[in-house]
């Protein structure tokens, strides 16, 4: 039987602004070399990671907040990460933990998820696995051969946690010059082959490791977003499985609406600042902690201090003159000096602007419905197989991983 999620990452309306999400860059180490990494120059500094004791002090002073967003470096390279998450769960009563990974360390991902489910029973975990394209495309973009490893991890997460409603599996894809030509095929293949809850596509952001990989224009991004919009109706259905009629309806309304609204705002800000038509709440509801203790209001703005200079006290940090000046400079998203395409903050800011949110979601749902008839989706086994052939995937490996049935299994299924 499926266990139920204790709350949802996307359906909460908030009008009171207080710290809601902490983004913790767990380590400055990584085992990949992604072309679009916006954190490469920070990691190159090879500063020391925050210690467990420093993170403990931060956690003990933060009070309750809802969401912990892990980041890195590669989170699975920090050995004491499960202890850190468990401590934050206990001290701060978090309900959601977003766990991104390049999924190279399969065993560790599975082991840690099992441990966290046991020790943090009421916490939802969104495991977000990076997959950037078919086979060689993914490997080129990630700078190391890791495509089959990542899908092995996806498959193992599914096998081990498919009945656990507290675990959502997401795939995250960053669009660059390497994968832009195949992105529509890739979204179709991902939907058809993986039992995931959602697939987000991101525009490469910040200063990337490799120059010249940001090839998206507002026009091309909007075209891609329009063509993939119908998939979000399908994903909404998956997320709503097991819920009653009202639950399914609300899930669909919020999920489809938030995804489309976020994508619309993002496309509008790809080339030039375009008002979000709502406050950006960075610095009021979010705090970013770099792996070495520098802190920021959001991932894309510069660090404004070091936690060590504030005794690792989150209250002091949030009340600091540095943070007040930062919020002033951000200008609540209405000042043209700060605009971005960052999905996490757009999404978070939407939920903190309930007045604007409902009309935005209604419009977004209507658009998605229209796009579903404009771009009908049909994905059968024949389509999936032809995509695997077109992009030269190793079918023997896919069978070995368990993603597609081998001859023996297929015969058994049709018998
Ligand atoms: S994008 Fe993530 S996985 Fe890739 S190099 Fe940067 S930190 Fe590592
Ligand atoms: S608009 Fe974007 S870059 Fe500016 S503070 Fe908000 S999230 Fe950060």
Image: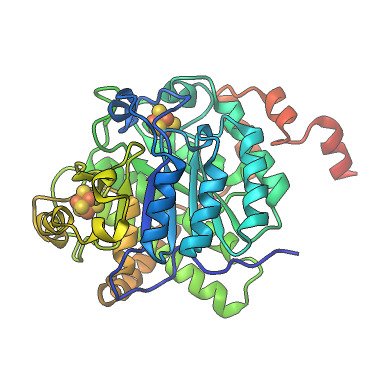
**Quadrant housing the C terminus:** top right
Which of the 4 image quadrants contains residue 28?
top left
Residue at (39, 26) in percent of width and height = 34
Q: How far across and down, in percent of the image, does residue 206 sit?
A: 25, 36
Q: How is the image coloured?
A: rainbow
Q: Looking at the image, is 282 positioned above or below residue 225?
A: below
Q: How far across and down, in percent of the image, does residue 37 sit?
A: 34, 30
- Say whether residue 61 is visible: yes
Q: Looking at the image, is 189 positioned above or below residue 244?
A: above
Which of the 4 image quadrants contains residue 353?
bottom left
Q: How far across and down, in percent of the image, does residue 272 sit?
A: 13, 46
Residue at (35, 53) in percent of width and height = 344
Residue occupying the far right of the picture: 415
- Say whether residue 181 is visible: no
Q: Is residue 262 left or right of residue 303?
A: right
Q: Nearer the viewer, residue 76 or 146?
A: 76
Count of numbered labels shown in the rendering: 0
Q: Nearer the viewer, residue 235 or 373?
A: 235
Q: Is residue 65 left or right of residue 332?
A: right
Which of the 4 image quadrants contains residue 204?
top left
**Quadrant housing the N terminus:** bottom right
Q: Looking at the image, is 40 positioned above or below residue 230?
A: above
Residue at (55, 53) in percent of width and height = 86
Q: Nearer the viewer, residue 86 or 310?
A: 310
């Amino acid at each position: 039987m499926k266990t139920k999620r204790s709350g949802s990452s996307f359906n909460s309306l908030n009008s009171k602004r207080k710290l809601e999400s902490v983004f913790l860059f767990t380590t400055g180490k990584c085992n990949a070399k992604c072309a679009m990494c916006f954190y490469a120059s920070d990691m190159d500094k090879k500063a020391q990671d925050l210690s467990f004791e420093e993170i403990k002090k931060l956690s003990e002073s933060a009070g309750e907040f809802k969401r912990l967003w892990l980041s890195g470096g590669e989170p699975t390279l920090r050995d004491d990460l499960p202890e850190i998450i468990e401590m934050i769960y206990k001290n701060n009563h978090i309900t959601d933990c977003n766990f991104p990974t390049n999924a190279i360390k399969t065993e560790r991902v599975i082991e840690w998820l099992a441990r966290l489910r046991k020790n943090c029973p009421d916490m939802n975990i969104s495991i977000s696995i990076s997959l950037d394209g078919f086979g060689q495309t993914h490997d080129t973009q990630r700078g190391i051969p890791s495509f089959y490893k990542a899908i092995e991890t996806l498959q193992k997460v599914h096998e081990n946690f498919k009945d656990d409603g507290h675990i959502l599996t997401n795939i995250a894809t960053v669009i660059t010059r390497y994968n832009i030509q195949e992105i529509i095929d890739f979204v179709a293949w991902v939907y058809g082959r993986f039992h995931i809850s959602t697939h987000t596509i991101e525009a490469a952001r910040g200063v990337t490791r490799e120059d010249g990989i940001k090839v998206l224009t507002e026009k091309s991004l909007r075209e891609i977003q329009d063509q993939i919009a119908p998939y979000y109706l399908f994903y909404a259905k998956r997320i709503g499985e097991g819920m009653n009629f009202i639950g399914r309806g609300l899930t669909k309304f919020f999920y489809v609406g938030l995804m489309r609204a976020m994508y619309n705002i993002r496309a509008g800000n790809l080339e030039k600042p375009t008002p979000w038509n709502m406050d950006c709440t960075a610095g009021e509801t979010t705090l970013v902690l770099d792996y070495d203790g520098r802190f920021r209001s959001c991932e894309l703005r510069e660090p404004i201090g070091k936690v060590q200079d504030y005794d690792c006290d989150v209250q002091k940090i949030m009340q600091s003159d540095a943070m007040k000046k930062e919020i002033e400079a951000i200008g609540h998203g209405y000042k043209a000096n700060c605009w971005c395409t960052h999905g996490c903050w757009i999404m978070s800011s939407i939920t903190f602007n309930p007045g604007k949110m409902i009309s935005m979601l209604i419009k977004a749902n209507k658009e998605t419905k229209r796009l579903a008839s404009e771009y009908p989706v049909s994905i059968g086994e024949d389509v999936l197989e032809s995509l695997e052939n077109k992009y030269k995937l190793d079918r023997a490996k896919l069978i070995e991983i368990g993603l597609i049935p081998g001859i023996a299994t297929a015969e058994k299924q049709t018998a």
